[in-house]
Image: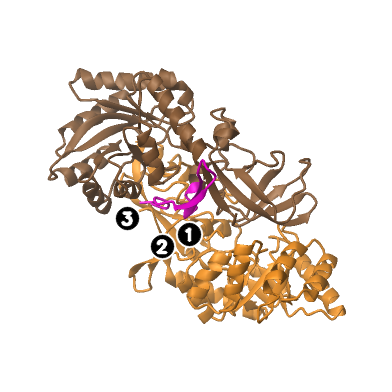
Chain colours: A brown, B orange
């Protein structure tokens, strides 16, 4: 193979998709996979064919690519601001079932101003900070206050609650959401959707009794960070970076043709920059932009210049975002290069 | 502005280009800028117009983009392996003055096999590890041994030495290179070019008495890591990421629309993920893929949802590689979006 390249095994992908669908159905949850990991319309279609009700995107540009590819139900889990993005959002809403999230009045007002004269109101979920300390209203009472506001604003339709939960404390997340839902219902405010998310917590889905749907992204490929969390095994990692040893300058050092522009510097708590499948004891201790530095000490491994190696990335979502195309391995062994259509859609 | 976006100030770029050219000329060195930072033909042209003898690329794909844009002299500072890349290299050599580097016999043999029947031999520089512990022969004696081999191989023309030096120890680097050069000359082997590199050492150029040319990349934009090293000031940082505050979930927390897919996780020794120009005391303490987490504690800053902020990236080369297009700010204030033509050329 011409390296570095990212190779995605479709049999593993399909097994991962089936597993998420099965876990969610067993917990009475609908699935709405997040496309941030694969950024590929063909993967979104596989997820929907397996039973997903729609997809999740983080950026308007990602949603546009997916709508172009015929995906019909898209939730953008993001506070969307700015006239340009709001115009694109209105155009999108005319050609798919679109919903968004919001955690503050400024964003709600902007959405309302833009959608007040559209034929259909925009469904809006309130983003809730249930412990992950990113976006989100800080308490069920704040959720209620924002729900009242959104319900009153023209052009918007209150659609429920959304959270990106912390890694731990699934029971507390559920209690938070249930309390917010009950506050809304007590005032007669609608709350048809409660959208929870995450791959690390797929073993906890039964705990999310208040949720109606689950968004997960990374599960489709899996990665080394999820192995470290016990969420999957190496055999579940569908996307692997192929690299070539280009230098053996010293007995304890090998250099490969994949650096931070292929693997990224994401550590996610791991001690080095990727798991070498052929030699798990050898460590990728450093990355230049186009070189990976492997410390062979104690690994018993003696790779030669020209050898191809395979790496399970620490964080596959950011790796997939660096490649204009990925190589699919079909179940019959056939390889196919496909463009990562929603790559680099930062806006 | 529609954020996140990377805005490049052309007046600052031209000042940075002029400064490198001036420093190099004062030290009797030619310049061969590395395009890894900007990945833009228009910037390469500006560098050549200012006096550079050619450019440096890290990947064959980058060199192809630059040759397509009419750049005539290209050094690829990389061990190139594999039939596909070697064919592309041969095609490139027919349309520009191309040279490459090599630190081992396997790579030398592969280059020779491919170029033996070409009309012109391929100029090859020996990559020397003068302390950076990446690629490169480990001693002047090893350089001599590989030089003999390359000199004897058909299709190749020994062109001298190349190093990517360590951050410190410029005098030792120079002594290393001088000794290798003297060993080659004592055997009558050619050594017309001694190519040194790096931006952090631009203040040391006079120490590199053995070098004939200097490759620097990051200097054209500069970044926070170079400010921290004392190599430039904030006013020299030409490329800045513009982001928008999209959430103020708590008094001490602001969330922006730029995460690791815009800023990358590169720390380069810095304590957090970028310098906020409007509030240097506020800290970007964490990055999700599409969210930046700002800790406002002690900053006295109270940004509002919708506010646009400006960030000097820790490591600008990897940031520029994430954007399909950057926005140029011309000296008259005009803004122009240009595609980052060599972005994502991983092979």
SS for callout 2: strand
Q: Is residue B251 visible?
A: no
User: What residue is shown at x 21% (from left), y 17% (from top)?
Assistant: A186
Q: Chain of mark 3?
A: B
Q: Are marks 1 and 2 in contact (CB under 8 Å)?
A: yes
Q: CA distance from mark 2 to mark 3?
A: 12 Å
Q: CA distance from mark 1 to mark 2?
A: 8 Å
User: What residue is shown at x 68% (from left), y 74% (from top)?
Assistant: B115
Same subunit, tags 1 and 2? yes
Same subunit, tags 2 and 3? yes
Q: Is residue B240 visible?
A: yes
How crowded pointer 2 is (Cα within 10 Å; few <14, some 14-19, many 20+) is rated as many
User: What residue is shown at x 70% (from left), y 63% (from top)?
Assistant: B165
Magenta stretch: includes residue A329: yes
How many tags in the picture?
Answer: 3
Q: Chain of mark 2?
A: B
User: Residue B321: percent from the left, percent from the top?
Assistant: 49, 58
Q: Quadrant of residue A296?
A: top right
- The residue to which callout 3 is attached is B2
Mark seen at residue B326: 2
Instruction: Indicate the quadrant containing the N terminus of chain A: top left, top right, bottom left or bottom right.
Output: bottom right
Specify the segment rendered in magenta: A320-347
- The residue to which callout 1 is attached is B320
SS for callout 1: helix
- The mark that comes first in sequence, 3 or 1, is 3
- Answer with left or right where residue B326 lies relative to residue B127: left
């Amino acid at each position: 193979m011409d390296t570095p390249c990212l190779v995605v095994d479709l049999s593993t992908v399909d097994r991962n998709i089936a597993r998420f669908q099965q876990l969610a159905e067993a917990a009475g949850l609908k699935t709405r996979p997040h496309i941030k990991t694969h950024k590929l319309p063909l993967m979104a279609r596989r997820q929907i064919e397996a039973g997903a009700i729609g997809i999740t995107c983080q950026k308007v540009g990602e949603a546009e690519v997916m709508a172009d590819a015929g995906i019909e139900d898209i939730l953008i889990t993001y506070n969307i601001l700015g006239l340009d993005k709001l115009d694109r959002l209105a155009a999108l809403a005319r050609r798919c079932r679109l919903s968004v999230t919001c955690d503050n009045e400024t964003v709600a007002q902007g959405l309302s101003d833009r959608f007040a004269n559209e034929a259909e109101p925009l469904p809006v979920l309130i983003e809730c900070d249930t412990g992950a300390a990113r976006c989100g209203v800080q308490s069920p009472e704040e959720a209620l206050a924002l729900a009242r506001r959104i319900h009153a604003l023209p052009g918007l339709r209150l659609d429920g609650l959304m959270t990106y939960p912390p890694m731990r404390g699934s029971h507390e997340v559920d209690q938070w959401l249930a309390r917010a839902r009950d506050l809304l219902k007590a005032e007669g405010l609608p709350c048809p959707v409660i959208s929870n998310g995450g791959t690390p917590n797929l073993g906890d889905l039964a705990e999310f009794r208040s949720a109606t749907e689950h968004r997960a992204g990374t599960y489709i490929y899996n990665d080394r960070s999820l192995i470290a969390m016990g969420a999957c095994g190496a055999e579940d990692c569908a996307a692997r970076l192929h690299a070539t040893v280009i230098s053996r300058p010293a007995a304890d050092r090998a250099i490969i043709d994949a650096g931070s522009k292929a693997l990224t510097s994401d550590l996610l708590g791991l001690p080095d920059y990727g798991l070498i499948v052929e030699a798990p004891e050898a460590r990728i201790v450093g990355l230049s932009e186009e070189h990976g530095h492997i410390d062979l000490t104690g690994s018993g491994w003696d790779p030669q210049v020209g050898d191809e190696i395979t790496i399970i990335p620490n964080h596959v979502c950011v790796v997939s975002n660096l490649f204009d195309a990925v190589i699919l391995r079909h179940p019959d062994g056939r390889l196919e290069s496909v463009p990562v259509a929603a790559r680099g859609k930062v806006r």
